[in-house]
């Protein structure tokens, strides 16, 4: 025999669980002030490095953050990340001009976000990366703690196709043609 009110309580529990899972992500993803904060941080990673402003650069990172450079150097922790990027004073050429595309931001929940950014205009005056002008992509994972977003992980990649387009291009099967390959008819996505 069912206890009085058990079904109602059970149904209420499921409603609350569904609400807790759905409402925060739906409402949060639409919050433009949160997106603007993240865009400012992601753009700041590039801007402050290019402009050699390590004080502002340091403010963007969590203490336990990690960073992987385009050459595969792994900096573990905010101190190593800032120290490594402090080389900018010695290796970033004055002709560097910050070029940024609007980052793509995706919220995983109300405390975690991923952002992808295209950058360009970097000129090194010294070191193994000395090239005319570099363009690339930055992938960033951010975490919100104590009401502030901070970078917890970032990976940089060089645009191996040379200059421009600066923007990130969504994948479509038609992109096969850029590489001179005809995609086989009827090939399901995810198979090659």
Image (cartoon, rainbow, N blue to C red):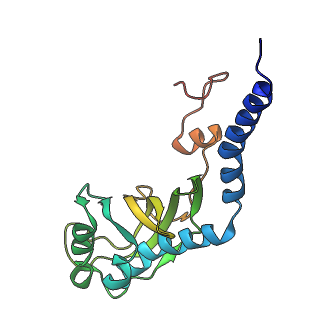
Q: Looking at the image, which residue is at 69% across and 65% down?
A: 31
Residue 104 in picture, x, y percent from top left = 59, 60
Above/below status of 16 relative to 134? above
The N terminus: image quadrant: top right
Mark yes or no: residue 52 visible. Answer: no
Task: Please count the marks in the image.
Answer: 0
Q: Quarter of the image holding residue 78? A: bottom left
Q: Looking at the image, which residue is at 61% across and 67% down?
A: 35
Camera-side residue: 124 or 68? 68
- Residue 2 shown left or right of residue 135 in the figure: right
Mark yes or no: residue 102 visible. Answer: yes
Above/below status of 19 relative to 121? above
Camera-side residue: 153 or 68? 153
Residue 107 in picture, x, y percent from top left = 59, 54
Camera-side residue: 92 or 80? 80
Q: Looking at the image, which residue is at 43% across and 79% down?
A: 47
- Residue 69 shown left or right of residue 154 in the figure: left
Q: Looking at the image, which residue is at 45% across and 71% down?
A: 120
Q: Quarter of the image holding residue 27? A: bottom right
- Residue 70 shown left or right of residue 189 in the figure: left
Residue 64 in picture, x, y percent from top left = 30, 61
Residue 106 in picture, x, y percent from top left = 59, 55
């Amino acid at each position: 025999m069912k206890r009085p009110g058990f079904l109602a309580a059970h149904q209420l529990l499921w409603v609350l669980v569904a609400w807790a899972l759905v409402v925060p992500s739906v409402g949060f993803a639409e919050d433009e002030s949160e997106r603007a904060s993240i865009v400012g941080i992601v753009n700041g990673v590039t801007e402050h490095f290019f402009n050699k402003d390590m004080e502002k650069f340091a403010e963007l990172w969590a203490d336990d953050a990690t960073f992987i450079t385009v050459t595969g150097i792994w900096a573990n922790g905010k101190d190593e990340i800032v120290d490594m990027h402090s080389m900018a004073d010695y290796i970033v050429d004055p002709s560097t001009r910050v070029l940024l595309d609007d980052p793509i931001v995706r919220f995983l929940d109300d405390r975690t976000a991923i952002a992808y950014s295209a950058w360009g205009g970097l000129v090194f005056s010294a070191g193994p990366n000395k090239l005319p002008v570099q363009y690339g992509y930055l992938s960033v994972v951010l975490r919100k703690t104590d009401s502030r977003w901070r970078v917890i992980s970032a990976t940089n990649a060089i645009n191996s196709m040379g200059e421009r387009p600066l923007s990130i291009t969504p994948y479509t099967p038609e992109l096969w043609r850029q590489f001179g390959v005809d995609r086989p008819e009827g090939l399901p996505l995810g198979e090659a």
